Amino acid sequence: MCPVALAACLVVFFFALPLSAADPPPLSERVADYHIDARLDPNSRTVTGHEVLRWRNTGRQPATELRFHLYLNAFDNNRTTLMAALPEAVERWAERFPGEWGGIDITSVRIGEQDVSKRFEFIRPDDGNPDDRTVARLSMDAPVRPRESIELEIDFNVRLPRLFMRAGHAAPFFVVAQWFPKLGVFQNGEWNCHQYHATTEFFADFGVYEVSLTVPVDYVLGHTGTVTSERDNGDGTKTVEVRAEDVHDFAWVADPRFQVVDDRIDDVRVRLLMQPNHVSQAARYLSGLRAAMERYGDWFGPYAYPTLTVVDPGPGGAAGGGMEYPMLMTAGTTWWMPRGLRVPEMLAVHEFGHQYWYGMVANNEFEEAWLDEGINSYVEGRIMDEAYGPEASYLDLFGLRLNHLAEARLGYLGAATHDPIARPAHAVLDRESYQSVAYSKTALVLETLDNYLGNDRLRAALRAYFQKWRFRHPTGNDWRTVVEETAGEPLGWFFEQTLDGTGVLDYAVARLDVRELPPLAGRRVVPEASGSRGGEKRYKVEVVVERRGEVRMPVDIAVGFDDGSETRQSWDGRDRWYRIEMTSRQRAEYAIVDPDGRLALDANRLNNSRMRSPGTRGIVRLAGRWGLWVQSALHLVTGF
């Protein structure tokens, strides 16, 4: 090799090494990149923004228009689609905070040198509501063809509402979320860009965000991404430059009162932004977060980002708590929160779980919310039980103990039959039904499926699903396929009943009859043939189990006897009833359907057993009612 060629190779080799180390391949197909300059004015509760958006058409059809989410316009008036779904809450909020409405105004849209602002028009693709301005479209002179890109510049002004739901302020605490003009997702030649409903969250493409945040110099910031630079502007403000890669959203919070608690869990820098009177509870957040991060990493795969920020909302800011954004999550607690009521821990576990299912997997939450909320609720319960004890993972206070199944059952039974799990979130009956099916019912469905499959096959399937579909926008059918492939058996019969239907699962012991048989007598008596022995009592036992719901599942039935022995039978659960008849030397004392509690989806567990003597039934019912009261109290405290 000649010296010149050798020198050239060495130069290429020298520069190639740091390049590969500094620039690893992207984790996602980066479709929508945003460069945003934003300035917060705490006094006027406004954000002034300038956005440069570069979008690449990764589909197979040309895009003749662009569609944008303008989420904050949901807080523009009391007749928007979101507000109209919550009339009583909106009325109370408006009376308490008159004039504290919010919204986003587009002041300029440019493509190159061309001002196209007048083409920006509001549409209502879901319900035609003329008072809703949460979706807009922009027509273009020429379509954006497959593999082509377009760049836009947008100027906008935001007025942050008094916190009502997710985004806004309880000044000086600000949650700036869903705050910029944000593209929908272009799929199969159409835009998936829904209005902002009370029962829906978000769906967007992955990309790179470079965001410049200018705030008062004494404000502490939390945000998606990592800081690349910070400068004092010398006018009482500072500017923080942030970059986030392979994310589909950007949110930030600001509050001068935040106390920063830094920690590290594995290779992730964890930053807690605590209110001064809650700093003593930072360890509780970290406890839940550590439990979640370690198990998620072991069970499904590593967290993909270098940092995570946990936000403790300021006074009056509870409506901004319990939410998830890439690399940022809001939680919530109170100064009086007893250790036995594990709200901070539960919120840490739950919101971190969203970093996986909402954040990295990123399914369409408008149309298949259960793929995020339900899977997350199921895994949350498993983590809470493992970390804090299977009987008292959520509540261990004054002798009262509660685990994840009890809490999930309360949410499920509140609206068990209104909507199928697979129905789009914006098409369900109401918010109660949405929470029941997307969160609680899905968690119980997965619990039931896990018990049916056994041997951690469901966990293996969830790991395979995460590994295959992270950063790719999967659908419910993709999830079902992975579960069947990993489990190694067809499960359509189960999914059709539990995900696509509205029927409930309910097996009951309808009858337990025990009759002492008279001594053997008759014209021809052969004691040896009948198994009778002189003076020995024998009993005829009849047990009838009914399927009172529509969902069919295999189920076990246990019959217990007065000598402490127990016998079991299995039933396929398909017919409306099943009878067990037997003759025994022992007297049957009880019968239980699903004795091991494997059917977590069973809607009425009070009818799962029957005793020969009715003496204890009142106690059983009273205990059930007491448990329901405890669940209601916990739900009141933790509902979000």
Image (cartoon, grey):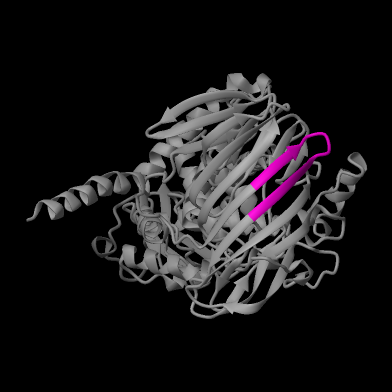
Query: Number of numbered discs present?
Result: 0
Q: From this viewpoint, is residue 123 visible?
A: no
Quadrant where the image shows the N terminus? bottom left
**Which quadrant of the structure image shows residue 282?**
top right
In the rendered view, tell whether residue 110 sits above or below residue 588. Answer: below
- Position of residue 280 relative to residue 454, above or below, is above
Query: Magenta residues, as a range?
Result: 37-51
Determine whether, in the image, residue 447 is placed left or right of residue 569: right
Q: Residue 76: x and y, percent? A: 84, 54
Residue appearing at x 92%, y 43% in the figure: 98
Q: Main secondary structure of the magenta part?
A: strand
Residue 159 spot, x, y in % from top left? 80, 47
* Residue at 44% in and 43% down: 305
Residue 430 shown in magenta: no
Q: Position of residue 112 (x, y in %)?
A: 64, 65
Q: Quadrant of residue 190?
A: bottom right
239 on left or right of 296: right
Which residue: 61% across, 42% down?
212
The answer to whether residue 103 is seen in the rendering is yes
Name the residue nearer the viewer: 360 or 589: 360
Residue in front for this viewpoint, 48 or 251: 48
Q: Along the horizontal axis of the image, is 552 left or right of 166?
A: left
Figure quadrant of residue 213: top right
Which image quarter is the C terminus in? Answer: top right
Q: Nearer the viewer, residue 2 or 86?
A: 2
Direction from residue 560 to residue 178 in the image, left or right:
right
